[in-house]
Image: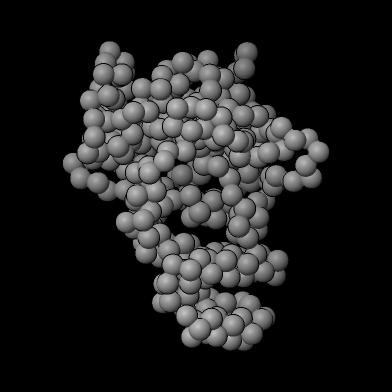
């Protein structure tokens, strides 16, 4: 980036009962090869020692630390922190994950060689255990070149809608993306799917074929406990995003991708015995699925069978 302005990167680091992993996560930010970083840390009313660990790590550093008095969830916590952000690029980062040392430097350089149409870039990710041991990589093509798997780039709306998954740990976004979306939708229990669908409708995505971060998989983690405790809210959120997507589809191919997604999510809801959610997916499918009558008959048959 010689001769070019070094853009400011804002990292919004969110903690919720991440105490055992916070020091490694924060120091992976402190040790970045890129220095023009604004770090905002927010703790979502942790019940462990997360706040104490954060305070011990950031002492003497110019870091904004926000503490929620009550748990308000990731979406609202991020938006609360984002109000203080001034960076050109934004990273949403959980404090149980890890950034490799050159991540931000490489992502900024990559962004500066892309057109303004690209709003989000993403990379491959190491999936690691609680103790940091490598389990696998998100995209196996990184280590298995013979794989024919294509990683979508550019207009990824249809791919994301049909069931494609980007590991959010790897993403960096232009500030304009969050500004246009008005942040995360605070009515939802989780943010990833909604962010992808809304942002991919107005911005392109670009893939960097490198591994620059690690996502930690924690046995009996707070996130998995949150999912179990808020299962219905998670299903409701996914349903609401599919309803949004219905209005955003502009082609027959995109509508067919939404059919695929709704059928998949309806099966998931059926598995977890949320018959009301299944019925509400049928309401969407009635409008867009040419095989709706057959599909509805199968659903009703299996529900009665149960």
- Where's residue 91, x and y in %? 47, 34
Q: Pick out the residue farthest to the left.
A: 69
**Residue situated in front as seen by the camera: 151 or 91:** 151
Q: Residue at x 37, y 28 (%)?
A: 21
**Residue situated in front as seen by the camera: 81 or 215:** 215
Residue 230 quadrant: bottom left
Residue 109 visible? yes
Residue 5 quadrant: top right
Q: How is the image coloured?
A: one colour
Q: Residue at x 81, y 38 (%)?
A: 146
Vertical placement of residue 185 versus 8, above or below: below
Residue 121 visible? no
**Residue situated in front as seen by the camera: 293 or 5:** 293
Vertical placement of residue 210 versus 225, above or below: above
* Left or right relative to 70: residue 283: right
* Left or right relative to 299: residue 13: left
- Where's residue 81, x and y in %? 33, 37
**Residue situated in front as seen by the camera: 202 or 92:** 92
- Where's residue 212, x and y in %? 58, 27
Vertical placement of residue 215 versus 285, above or below: above
- Where's residue 59, x and y in %? 26, 16
């Amino acid at each position: 980036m010689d001769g070019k302005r070094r853009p400011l990167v804002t990292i919004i680091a969110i903690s919720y009962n991440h105490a055992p992993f916070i020091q490694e996560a924060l120091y992976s930010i402190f040790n970045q090869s890129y220095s023009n970083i604004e770090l905002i840390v927010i703790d979502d009313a942790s019940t462990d020692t997360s706040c104490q660990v954060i305070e011990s790590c950031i002492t003497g550093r110019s870091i904004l630390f926000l503490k929620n008095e009550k748990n308000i969830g990731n979406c609202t916590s991020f938006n609360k922190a984002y109000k203080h952000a001034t960076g050109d690029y934004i990273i949403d980062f959980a404090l149980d994950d890890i950034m490799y040392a050159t991540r931000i430097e490489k992502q900024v350089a990559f962004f500066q060689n892309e057109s303004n149409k690209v709003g989000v870039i993403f990379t491959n990710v190491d999936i690691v255990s609680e103790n940091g041991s490598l389990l696998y990589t998100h995209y196996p093509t990184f280590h298995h070149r013979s794989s024919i798997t294509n990683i979508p780039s550019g207009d990824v709306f249809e791919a994301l809608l049909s069931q494609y998954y980007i590991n959010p740990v790897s993403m960096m976004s232009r500030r304009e993306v969050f500004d246009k979306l008005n942040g995360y939708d605070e009515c939802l229990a989780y943010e990833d799917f909604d962010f992808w669908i809304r942002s991919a409708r107005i911005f392109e995505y670009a893939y960097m074929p490198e591994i620059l971060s690690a996502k930690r998989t924690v046995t009996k983690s707070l996130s998995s406990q949150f999912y179990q405790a808020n299962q219905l809210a998670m299903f409701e959120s996914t349903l609401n995003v599919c309803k949004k997507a219905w209005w955003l589809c502009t082609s027959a191919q995109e509508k067919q991708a939404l059919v695929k997604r709704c059928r998949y999510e309806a099966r998931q809801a059926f598995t977890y015995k949320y018959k009301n959610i299944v019925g509400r997916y049928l309401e969407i499918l009635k409008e867009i699925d040419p095989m709706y009558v057959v599909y509805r008959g199968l659903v009703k048959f299996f529900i009665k069978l149960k």
